């Protein structure tokens, strides 16, 4: 993809959002075409300087990806003073998190993975009564369980955690009172996770190290959930009796190791919606499964942040 190609695309279509992370902009300047009518834009790792970013900050969309720009907390605080943003992907910058309390600007959705965050920054943000609704962390090795307790005071309802952050034992001790917990990375298996006291609506364990054996351990320490996502895990037919018996409203088994034979055996006991993907089954199996009312075909959808 070239910058000229993007400009032509912008002329020919009415885009809502555009992700062009990693494309070097000539002279590090943000192209004028990106200021027109976009609601979402990701220009992470595009070689844009702080000076250039500040020059056009108020013209950039409210949902913005600016990862890999080496921003520090003072710079980001100044940008947020100039113009608040609703959703920011700030992965892989140089942020310790102090901008949260300094700016006092509520950000609905923020990705702070791969930043040198420190515990105290979340405490200061909580003391400033700053609300962050959706928070993504990962590869933040300086954070401890104290930081986890403090960030939950900020009103976080959706917490997404990648590897290199909190452990399953730390999450268990925190007694999470959030709507959705999303874990990413093979280090999360569920074997040491205790969510008995958690008030979760959705638990997303996609692409983690969860297996049927480890989920069996987790199930006894898992409170009621309405949505359970196990996409891309090693879950197989052995887990189906447990999963069906949980009575979840929506169960995603896309790209797992469950078989059509296993699903046929338990389909009469399924009360909620089951999500699978076409690549899991043969054409004949897929045709048969499609006739089951509560089985839906899903797809891998790319989220923004």
Image (cartoon, grey):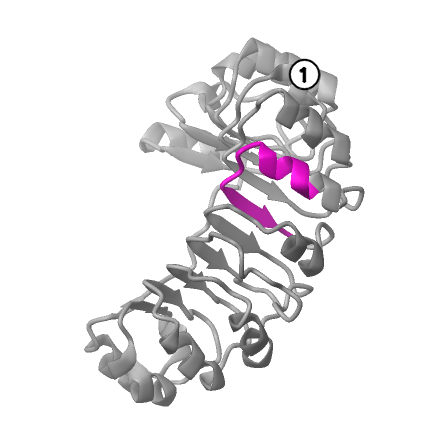
Q: Residue 189 versus residue 18: which sits nearer the camera?
A: 189
Q: Which residue is drawn at 47% across and 66% down?
A: 231
- On screen, 296 above or below 305? below
Q: Which residue is drawn at 60% across and 57% down?
A: 184
**Label 1 Cα crowd, 10 Å radius (few <14 / some 14-19 / many 20+):** some
- On screen, 270 above or below 164? below
**In this orientation, does residue 217 appear?**
yes
243 sits left or right of 291 in the view: right
Position in image of residue 249 (x %, y %) = 32, 63
Q: Residue 104 versus residue 295: which sits nearer the camera?
A: 104
- On screen, 23 above or below 228? above
Q: Residue 172 versus residue 203: which sits nearer the camera?
A: 172
Residue 16 occupies quadrant? top left
Residue 7 occupies quadrant? top left
**In this orientation, does residue 111 appear?**
no
Q: Residue at x 63, y 36 (%)?
A: 151
Q: What element carries label 1?
A: helix
Answer whether residue 172 is magenta in the image: no
Q: Give the range drawn in magenta.
A: 148-162
Position in image of residue 286 (x %, y %) = 29, 79
Position in image of residue 292 (x %, y %) = 21, 77
162 sits left or right of 72 in the view: left
- On screen, 173 above or below 56? below
Residue with the most extreme front position: 197
Q: Label 1, on which residue?
A: 102
Count numbered badges in the picture. Answer: 1
Position in image of residue 283 (x %, y %) = 30, 82
């Amino acid at each position: 993809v070239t910058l000229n190609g993007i400009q032509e695309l912008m002329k020919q279509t009415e885009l809502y959002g555009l992700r062009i992370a990693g494309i070097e902009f000539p002279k590090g300047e943000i192209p004028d075409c990106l200021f027109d009518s976009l609601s979402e834009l990701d220009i992470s790792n595009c070689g844009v300087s702080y000076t250039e970013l500040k020059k056009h900050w108020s013209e950039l969309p409210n949902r913005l990806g600016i990862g890999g720009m080496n921003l520090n907390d003072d710079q980001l605080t100044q940008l947020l003073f100039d113009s608040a943003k609703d959703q920011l992907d700030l992965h892989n910058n140089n942020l310790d998190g102090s901008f949260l309390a300094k700016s006092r600007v509520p950000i609905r959705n923020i990705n702070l993975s791969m930043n040198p965050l420190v515990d105290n920054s979340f405490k200061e943000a909580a003391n400033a009564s700053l609300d962050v609704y959706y928070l993504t962390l990962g590869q933040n090795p300086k954070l401890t369980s104290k930081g986890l307790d403090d960030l939950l005071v900020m009103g976080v309802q959706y917490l997404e955690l990648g590897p290199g952050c909190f452990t399953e034992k730390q999450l268990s001790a925190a007694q999470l009172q959030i709507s959705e917990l999303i874990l990413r990375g093979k280090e999360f298996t569920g074997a040491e996770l205790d969510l008995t006291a958690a008030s979760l609506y959705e638990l997303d364990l996609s692409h983690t190290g969860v297996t049927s054996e480890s989920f069996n351990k987790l199930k006894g320490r898992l409170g009621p959930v309405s949505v359970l996502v196990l996409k891309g895990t090693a879950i197989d037919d052995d887990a189906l009796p447990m999963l069906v018996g949980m009575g979840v409203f929506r169960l995603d088994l896309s790209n797992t190791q469950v078989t059509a034979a296993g699903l046929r055996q338990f389909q009469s006991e399924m009360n909620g919606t089951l999500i699978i993907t076409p690549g899991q089954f043969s054409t004949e199996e897929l045709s048969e499964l499609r006739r089951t009312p509560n089985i839906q075909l899903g797809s891998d959808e790319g989220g923004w942040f």
